[in-house]
Amino acid sequence: MQNAWDSSSKCLAPSALPALLVRLPRPLVFTNGVFDLLHVGHVACLERARRHGACLLVALNTDASAGRLGKPGRRPVLALPQRARLVAALGCVSWVSWFDENGPAVLLELLKPEVYVKGGDYRPECLPESALVAGWGGRTEIEPHAAGHSTTALLQHIRGGAPARGREAAR
């Protein structure tokens, strides 16, 4: 018997997604990112993303893909299995998968979500995925950026290089 609290059961290899497609509740919401050192900004964005549909699938950059993004320092700090398990543990997340390409286009084409969500540090017209999703009638939603919350700022604080940020009460 599978433990209902085992978040690893929500982590699926990309090769397992075609079989899941027929069971996915619609509208499907899709978002992607590195989600390294999960913080309150990530959680807030994922919670808001989930409100756009019946199911939220989060696609993570693999370690190699994340490394190609040019983030400062040796990133990601946490390996893909750890990042996937942390994101999957959130109640608003239905499924977690990953991609090794520079962007999520392959997974988007496969799943054809009705809603593609990104954080407020992006603009729809600058995302190639926006046109892709619009091609099958989907839409892109940009959720507000949680100011003062970033993995980079968190790492700077841990290393003693920046003042503590984001200490306001949880909303």
Image (cartoon, grey):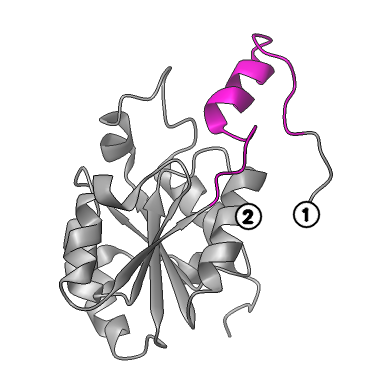
Give the crowd class for mark 1: few <14, some 14-19, many >=20 residues within 10 Å. Answer: few
Residue annotated with mark 2 = 44
What amino acid type should be assigned to the residue bearing mark 1?
Arg
Q: Is residue 39 left or right of residue 71?
A: right
Question: Is residue 145 on the magenta stretch?
Answer: yes
Residue drawn 80% across and 34% down? 167
Residue drawn 40% across and 84% down? 27
Q: Residue furthest right?
A: 169
Q: CA distance from mark 1 to mark 2?
A: 8 Å
Nearer the observer, 41 or 4: 41
SS for tag 1?
loop
Q: Residue furthest top?
A: 161
What amino acid type should be assigned to the residue bearing mark 2?
Ala
Residue annotated with mark 1 = 171
The residues colored magenta run 144-166
Overall secondary structure of the magenta section: loop
Image quadrant occupied by the C terminus: bottom right
Image quadrant occupied by the N terminus: bottom right
Residue 34, above or below 134: above
Residue 114, above or below 164: below
Of label 1 and label 2, which has the lower sequence position?
A: 2
Rendering coords of residue 147 (x, y %): 62, 36
Residue drawn 63% across and 55% down? 44
Residue drawn 36% across and 90% down? 23
- Do the residues under discs 1 and 2 have CB atoms within 8 angstroms? yes
Q: Is residue 124 left or right of residue 36?
A: left
Rendering coords of residue 19 (x, y %): 26, 83
